[in-house]
Image (spheres, helix red, strand yellow):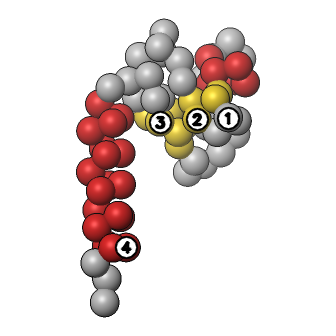
Amino acid sequence: MTDDDPINNRDNFKAGIFYYNPDDDRMLIRLPGTVNRYVFNYARWPVYLVIVPVAAMICYALFFRR
């Protein structure tokens, strides 16, 4: 990653934590200066193929737990 990497531009973050950049082709981006911290690029539609089923499983587990 370079200094002109779009991940370094805070304007690409919505609400401070959601990375949204339609011009960036990456779907999963490592945060600079970290070892194991990644963010999803919410402008990429395949991200929603991961988020929606995981959210559905969490809701199912919360509603139907014993």
Instruction: Give the residue pinned by disc 1.
Output: 15
x, y percent for residue 62: 37, 73
Q: How far apart are labels 4 and 3 at the CA level?
A: 24 Å
Instruction: Give the residue pinned by disc 3.
Output: 40
Three-letter code, disc 1:
Ala
x, y percent for residue 20: 54, 24
Quarter in which the C terminus is drawn: bottom left
Q: How far apart are labels 2 and 3 at the CA level?
A: 8 Å
Three-letter code, disc 2:
Phe
Three-letter code, disc 3:
Phe
Apparent side of residue 43 relative to residue 63 in the rendered image (left or right) = right
Q: Nearer the viewer, mark 1 or mark 4?
A: 4
Instruction: Give the residue pinned by disc 2.
Output: 18
Give the class, few, some or many, for how many residues have Cα within 10 Å of label 4's Cα (few <14, many ≥20).
few
Instruction: Give the residue pinned by disc 4.
Output: 62
Q: How far apart are labels 1 and 2 at the CA level?
A: 6 Å
Q: From the viewer's side, name the closer residue of 28 and 14.
A: 14
Q: From the viewer's side, name the closer residue of 21 and 38.
A: 21
Give the class, few, some or many, for how many residues have Cα within 10 Å of label 2's Cα (few <14, many ≥20).
some
Apparent side of residue 39 relative to residue 14 in the rendered image (left or right) = left
